[in-house]
Image: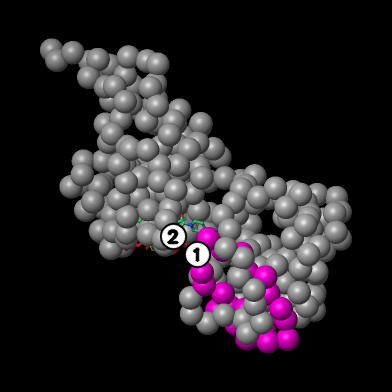
Amino acid sequence: MHVLILGGTTEARGLAELLCAPAGTSAAPPRVTSSLAGRVAAPRLPPGEVRVGGFGGADGLARWLREHRVDLLVDATHPFAGTMSFHAAGAAAAGGVPLLALRRPGWTAVEGDDWHTAGSLEEAAGMLPALGRRVFLTTGRTGLPAFAGLDALWFLVRSVDPPEGPCPARMEVLPARGPFTLAGERELLRRHRVDVVVTKDSGGAATAPKLTAAREAGLPVVVVRRPPAPGGIPVVPDAGAAARWVRERLGAGSPQSRPAAP
Ligand code: NAP
């Protein structure tokens, strides 16, 4: 059995680790390939096989699934990687390959939060001048052009790799990769005198402490809503549930479990 994981997330790496670990059952372990887009210069690599770079659209992915005899496809891309999720749905349907979406749940506001929801990065940028002057921007380096025209504001930009292309005129870049701690986030907001935070609704624990720190400091947070995801696909919230989905199908597809020929 060959499982392709569309990755680039903590959950995708976690799933590869679970599938590559000894299963403790008689079923043979699957062949696991993780696919990365190639956006990060030095990604944390999962166990198993890894391929890097785009497939060339949904058709290219469908071809890859066929040529590499993929039995199961798991879309474990980031909730904001909307294009790839639709390509996965199209390719899986075209090739008759079972598809699972591994998508961490979004965040929910709690008592004391001052959240302002935006439908896009551009809308978030438009909301900022009314909310603050010193912005902690955690939406990733590829979205920076949306904030490039806001010359009256100062930005603290946290990203894994350095930004490229149009950027805000007044900006400090903080190269960092999660997970982040609450103590660290509190200190960061204080030291940089941040008065507004911008985040995507990425969900998950690794980057959530900034939300707690902002709540404690009484700061507004602009939360960018997730893009639409393809419907009609089973969705699980974590790597453990995704591993169970794969193993159930592994068992069903193993030679021992197939009915004997008449
Ligand atoms: P996207 O807009 O949905 O995808 C753009 C194109 O990148 C796709 O059409 C595909 O190219 C290629 N691609 C995306 N994910 C891929 C993967 N796992 N393997 C191979 N090719 C992939 O995606 P994105 O928002 O640029 O995100 C790119 C990657 O970064 C994803 O893997 C995602 O999990 C990760 N990531 C994204 C974010 C975010 O905020 N967007 C945050 C953290 C991590 P082809 O059409 O040529 O196949």
User: With 104 as the anchor, is 152 left or right in this view?
Assistant: right
Amino acid at circle 1:
Asp
Q: Is residue 34 visible?
A: yes
Q: Quadrant of the C terminus?
A: top left
Whichever of callouts 1 and 2 sits on the residue coming sooner in the sequence is 2
Residue 75 visible within the image: no
Q: Which mark is residue 161?
A: 1
* Segment tinted magenta in the rendering: 144-163
In the rendered image of this protein, does residue 125 appear above or below residue 262? below
Q: Position of residue 154 (x, y in %)?
A: 71, 78
Give me the residue at 65% from left, 77% from top: 171
Q: Nearer the viewer, residue 197 or 88?
A: 197
Residue at disc 2, secondary structure: loop
The structure residue drawn at horizontal position 32% and vertical position 60%, both measured from the top left corner, is 54
Relative to the observer, which residue lies in front, 2 or 45? 45
Nearer-the-camera pick, 117 or 13 = 13
Which image quadrant for residue 187? bottom right
Asked if the residues shown at circle 1 and circle 2 are in contact, with their CB atoms under 8 angstroms apart, the answer is yes
The answer to which quarter of the image holds residue 248 is top left
Q: Disc number at residue 40?
A: 2
Does dot 1 land on a helix, a strand or a loop? loop
> Where's the N terminus, which quadrant?
top left
Q: Is mark 2 within 8 Å of ligand 1?
A: yes
Give how far apart the Cα atoms at labels 1 and 2 are.
Answer: 7 Å
